[in-house]
Image (tube, coloured by chain):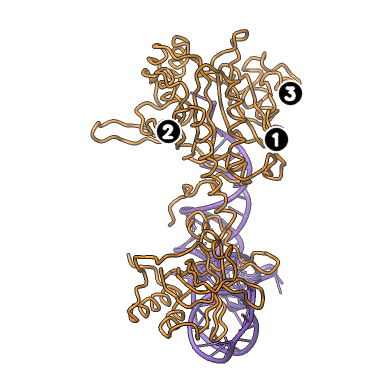
RNA sequence: GCGCUCCUGGCUCAAUUGGCAGAGCAACGGACUCUUAAUCCGUGGGUUCCGGGUUCAAGUCCCGGGGGGCGUACCA
């Protein structure tokens, strides 16, 4: 397929041909020595000839003088290009340059009459000719941005343009990488071992979600993209890797919305000799480290809320809080009664199963009020098959979910390590499963049978944490290349 | 999946009740040797997402399709 042709591309292709006719390579393989733009800015006025390179972001022509702004990742600087300072060929080349082209320049630095530090260009080289126009965004003297590219569809499909033109977006992705990096540093420095477990799995588990299904040709069997890393990481804990974590993609074949992506990044960590209380501390500390890495303070603005990230986070016990907010002892109600209440509240007419009902009712009565960082603790046992029950109340598990501004950021428990209990729960669950009736991860149970020490486990939704720390209202703004439908 | 809503030159947006498809930036030609949303003069650029329908007349109304956004549902 040939390049799409419109007025702009044709025009640039002609210039490209013209440049080649001048025997100038429009895509030379080497970049001459250069300094980052911000180094030039820091240097200030000097008669020394310095060089840099960057993309032409603006061009203001004044006859025999041309001002260009060029940008590299470190900043933006003005070029002062005067015909008398250049050889004829370079001046001709300048005429064939467009916004978006990438150039190398050298010259002394001086301050113009209007006070702008500029490169008095004596050498001008083309490093890359742009044949496709980029949208032109201008910022006026008041700092107001005009004609910003804001169409989400355009931005997600052409992230290169978004990163080039939208500072907020670029900074958000930089923050994301730093946040992940900070998580690693925090865990590594506390003797956690980072591992990689299978993405392609024969038996998926560790969460309740529909998987993406694939097929392994040479084995002639279906396989699945993982929905969680939990069941593999716990085998490692049983095997003696007592502090272990993995940061990676999980895939869930479910609906997409502001807070759900089919492909999302999760940090799961497991730690022996501790429990869910230890995981609360881990979460608090990870959030601290992440906020620091993102360059935000202990109070962040997210979706119009002032969020105070200072630990300790609030503890919100599931059953008592549900009772308090609803005014009823719902945990003692049977499914039929709960179902009637849920229907009355418009939460759904056909929910019959007690744990789901309790969860829904909790979401209705309590979750919306969880603006400041909170741990919802001690979930009903039916909602938490992989968690350990409390010793004094077997209907309740040692589990928490962390919420900020109503957003679920983490899920953790004191890990269930009773192999007989775990087998029974998983087999019962598998018997009810629509998709994979009776399929249980036997190898995971084998590990528990061999014996896994008491441990706490914690899963953190990395994309969502990035949302909170960078004030992004959609998870798609935290994922470089979110999934979109095919065009056409 | 369902509901609401949006889709107009490269980009950002106009177009009254259905009545000649426009502007700014960008592009092209010209003037201009300190501008910075440079300015001034001139020029070109449209299958109004796609396909049907109603109408003398459709960017606008109706039906179907595609894509996006928001909400909702599913989501241990």
Give the residue furthest to the top.
A392
Instruction: For mark 2, give the secondary structure.
Output: loop
Left or right, A408 with reference to A307? left
The chain painted orange is A
Q: Earlier in the sequence, mark 2 or mark 3?
A: 2
Residue at 59%, 17% in the rendered image: A398
| Residue A372: quadrant of the picture | top right
Give the residue at mark 2: A211
Task: Say if A13 sits above or below A1 in the image.
Answer: below
Q: Quadrant of the N terminus of chain A?
A: bottom left
| Residue A465: quadrant of the picture | top right
Q: Quadrant of the C terminus of chain A?
A: bottom left
Give the residue at mark 1: A371
The chain painted purple is B
Query: Chain for mark 3?
Result: A
The CA distance from mark 1 to mark 3 is 18 Å
Foreground: A346 or A19?
A19
């Amino acid at each position: 397929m040939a390049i799409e042709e419109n007025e702009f591309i044709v025009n640039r292709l002609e210039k490209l041909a013209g440049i080649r006719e001048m025997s100038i390579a429009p895509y030379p393989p080497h970049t001459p020595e250069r300094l980052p733009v911000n180094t030039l800015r820091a240097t200030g006025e000097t008669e020394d000839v310095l060089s840099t390179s960057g993309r032409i972001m603006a061009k203001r022509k004044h006859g025999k003088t041309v001002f260009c702004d060029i940008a590299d990742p470190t900043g933006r600087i003005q070029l002062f290009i005067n015909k008398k300072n250049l050889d004829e060929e370079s001046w001709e080349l300048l005429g064939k340059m467009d916004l978006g082209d990438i150039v190398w320049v050298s010259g002394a630095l001086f301050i113009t009459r209007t006070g702008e530090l500029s490169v008095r260009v004596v050498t001008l080289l083309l490093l890359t000719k742009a044949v496709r126009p980029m949208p032109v965004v201008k910022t006026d003297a008041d700092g107001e941005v005009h004609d910003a590219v804001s169409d989400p569809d355009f931005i997600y499909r052409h992230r290169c343009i978004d990163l080039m033109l939208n500072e907020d977006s670029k900074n958000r992705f930089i923050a994301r990488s730093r946040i992940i990096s900070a998580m690693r540093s925090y865990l590594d420095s506390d003797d956690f071992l980072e591992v990689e477990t299978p993405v392609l799995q024969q038996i998926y588990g560790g969460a309740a979600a529909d998987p993406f299904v694939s097929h392994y040709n040479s084995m002639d069997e279906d396989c699945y993209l993982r929905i969680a890393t939990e069941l593999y990481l716990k085998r490692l804990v049983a095997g003696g890797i007592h502090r272990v974590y993995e940061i990676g993609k999980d895939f869930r074949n479910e609906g997409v919305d502001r807070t759900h992506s089919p492909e999302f990044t999760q940090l799961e960590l497991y730690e022996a000799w501790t429990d869910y209380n230890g995981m609360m501390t881990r979460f608090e500390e990870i959030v601290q480290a992440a906020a620091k890495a993102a360059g935000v303070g202990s109070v962040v603005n997210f979706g119009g809320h002032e969020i105070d990230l200072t630990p300790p986070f609030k503890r919100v016990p599931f059953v008592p809080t549900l009772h308090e907010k609803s005014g009823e002892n719902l945990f003692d109600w049977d499914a039929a009664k709960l179902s009637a209440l849920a229907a009355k509240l418009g939460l759904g007419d056909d929910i019959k199963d007690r744990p789901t009902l309790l969860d829904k009712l909790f979401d209705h009565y309590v979750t919306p009020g969880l603006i400041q960082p909170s741990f919802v603790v001690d979930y009903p046992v039916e909602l938490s098959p992989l968690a350990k029950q409390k010793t004094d109340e077997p209907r309740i598990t040692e589990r928490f979910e962390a919420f900020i501004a109503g957003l679920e950021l983490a899920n953790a428990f004191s890990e269930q390590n009773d192999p007989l209990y775990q087998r029974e729960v998983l087999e019962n669950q598998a018997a009810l499963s629509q998709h994979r009736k009776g399929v249980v991860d036997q190898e995971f149970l084998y590990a528990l049978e061999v014996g896994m020490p008491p441990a706490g486990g914690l899963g953190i939704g990395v994309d969502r944490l990035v949302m909170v720390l960078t004030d992004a209202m959609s998870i798609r703004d935290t994922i470089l290349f979110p999934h979109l439908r095919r065009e056409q």
